[in-house]
Amino acid sequence: KRGIVPIFFYYNIKIKRLSNKSDYKKLRLFKIIKKVLLINYELRLLNTI
């Protein structure tokens, strides 16, 4: 549904920390803009990601 707020996990992006233990498992909540495929969604991300 449009407007659902999913949690974006970090394993799809590169983070510049030395250890994975200190990385955040879940970055934050993002809004869904549109549904692209059955399980793929376009999200509204921040400019810094």
Image: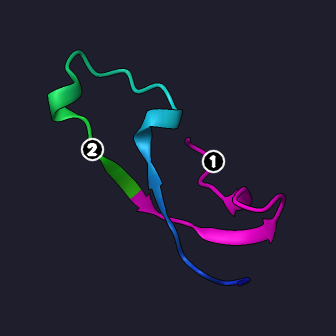
Q: Which mark is residue 26?
A: none
**Could you say which is closer to the camera, residue 3 or residue 36?**
36
Q: Residue at x 23, y 15 (%)?
A: 18
Q: Residue at x 23, y 26 (%)?
A: 20
Residue of label 1: 47
Task: Find numbered disc 1 in the image and state the secondary structure of the residue it sits on.
Answer: loop
- Residue positioned most to the left: 21
* Residue 37 image point, x, y percent: 82, 58
Looking at the image, residue 36 lies above or below residue 9: below
Q: Which mark is residue 24?
A: 2
Q: Is residue 13 left or right of residue 45?
A: left
- Residue positioned most to the top: 18
| Magenta region includes residue 44 | yes
**Could you say which is closer to the camera, residue 6 or residue 30?**
6
Q: Residue at x 60, y 81 (%)?
A: 4
- Residue positioned most to the front: 38
Number of other residues with Cα within 10 Å of mark 1, as a class: few under 14, some 14 to 19, many 20 or more: few
User: In 3D space, how far apart are the residues under numbered discs 1 and 2 (Cα atoms)?
Assistant: 18 Å
Find the magenta span and give its range: 28-49
Of callouts 1 and 2, the N-terminal one: 2
Looking at the image, residue 2 lies above or below residue 8: below
Task: Find numbered disc 2 in the image and state the secondary structure of the residue it sits on.
Answer: loop
